[in-house]
Amino acid sequence: MKSFCRPKNVEITSVEYNLKAVHYAFDEKLKRKDFQRLLIQTGEISRKELEEDLKTGQRRKINKAIYALTEAYTKEIREHNGQITFDKIREFDRVDGISGKLRHLCQESPKQQIFEYITKWATEELLQAKILPCQFGSIPGGGQVKCKESIEKIVRRQFGGDVDAVQIDIYHAYPSTKTTVITKIIDKYCHKNKPLCTLVKNVMQNYPGGVLIIGGFWSSWAFNLAMSFFLRRILEEKKTRRGKQIRMVKAVVCFADDVLIFGDRSNLIKAIKTEGRWIKSEYGLTIKDAWTIIRFKKFERYTKWEPRIDMAGYIVSSTRTTIRGAIFKRIRRQTIRAKAELNRLGYIPYWRAWTLTAYNGWLVHSNSLKFIRKYGYQHLFKMAKKSIRKHERQVRNGANLCNPTSTG
């Protein structure tokens, strides 16, 4: 078995090695007050100097403070790895605006988030080797659009609409994935790098309930890593016919805990049942009983109803792609309100413009030409961008923005 992340390549006790990960963490979160406080506490930069660096974009003092912080954290890894302490994780519930589900979310301290960036940076070799191209959730270069395009390619071009699909879902994916499962995987593949194995355990030691958390940077990568082994086993399922081995699964698309499997219906059901028992015994994860079976073959031959795949916010059929109903209603509502405000005020308020432009990608990447023409969306989008540009220009010039509708 190949070993990954060997000490000669992954030196988490080196400041220079960890510096890139810390820089990446601050590139994502530098405008947040809690991360700014970390830099100020190093004594290398004051709040005034920090604001000046952000305004000019030079970041000389900021880079100096980041280096000092990296030195301090690397020293903790070198001297106290395994006993590094983090603040208690904040837990709270939030209703999902699209599905209406109650999500149990967590927020980590800035220090723990930075250590998670270091952990991800150190395990990059393993993640790149194991995470499959068919995984799209919480992965750079993936996302909803890439997931949708992959489904379109499989359904329309790869199999020409002549294929069956089964959509399955993992029950309580993150809350059911124990941290011991992740440490077991890291210990197996990175066993030659003891400091890294210890750091992974240390980073996850204060996770509530000893399970992965929704909202954690490392948790999303760790779950995708665990899922990659399940997906690989699904793809390798075979049966013997006339002395030859035949693959039971033709293709797989995975978005977080949603898995879409393509092939022949009977073969797919057998493969899911077999690997469902494996993932239950190995990871403690359960596949929901409510499967969605999509039979494109049946549509071609017997009925006028067009089967569709509902995944990642898009509804994909063998002929067109539309937007999920709950999301489409939000887009239409914001479009109607923006159109009414444009007619009444002569401009779109910037706060409405931000909302409208945020939904633009859904329309661009789906067959929504009828909607765009009916509501004059292209003109609204143009006016929304104009409103945002004017607002940002006033912010840069220090204008009084007490009245949010004063920017047109």
Image (cartoon, rainbow, N blue to C red):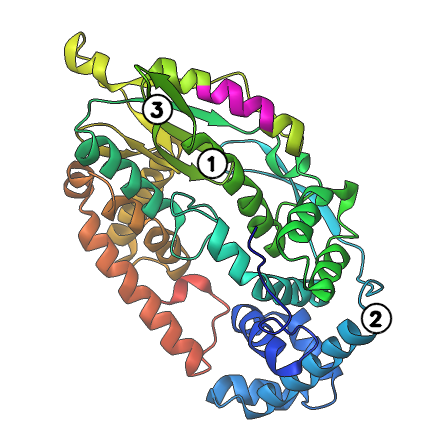
Task: Say what amino acid the circle numbered 2 marks.
Answer: His
Crowd class of label 2 (few under 14; some 14 to 19; many from 20; radius 10 Å) = few
Crowd class of label 3 (few under 14; some 14 to 19; many from 20; radius 10 Å) = few
- CB within 8 Å, label 1 to label 3: no
Q: Which residues are magenta?
A: 271-278
| Above or below for 169 versus 232 | above
Q: Nearer the viewer, mark 1 or mark 3?
A: 3
Q: Residue at x 80, y 67 (%)?
A: 81
| Above or below for 308 versus 124 | above
User: Does the stretch in magenta take in 275?
Assistant: yes
Q: Which mark is residue 231?
A: 1
Front residue (pair 122, 347): 122
Mark 1 or mark 2: whose residue is earlier in sequence: 2
Across and down, in percent, residue 388 comes to: 34, 66
Q: Residue at x 37, y 13 (%)?
A: 266
Q: Which residue position is annotated with label 2? A: 80
Across and down, in percent, residue 391 comes to: 38, 70
Q: Which residue position is annotated with label 3? A: 245
Q: Residue at x 22, y 12 (%)?
A: 298
Crowd class of label 1 (few under 14; some 14 to 19; many from 20; radius 10 Å) = many
Front residue (pair 248, 379): 248
Across and down, in percent, residue 217 comes to: 60, 56
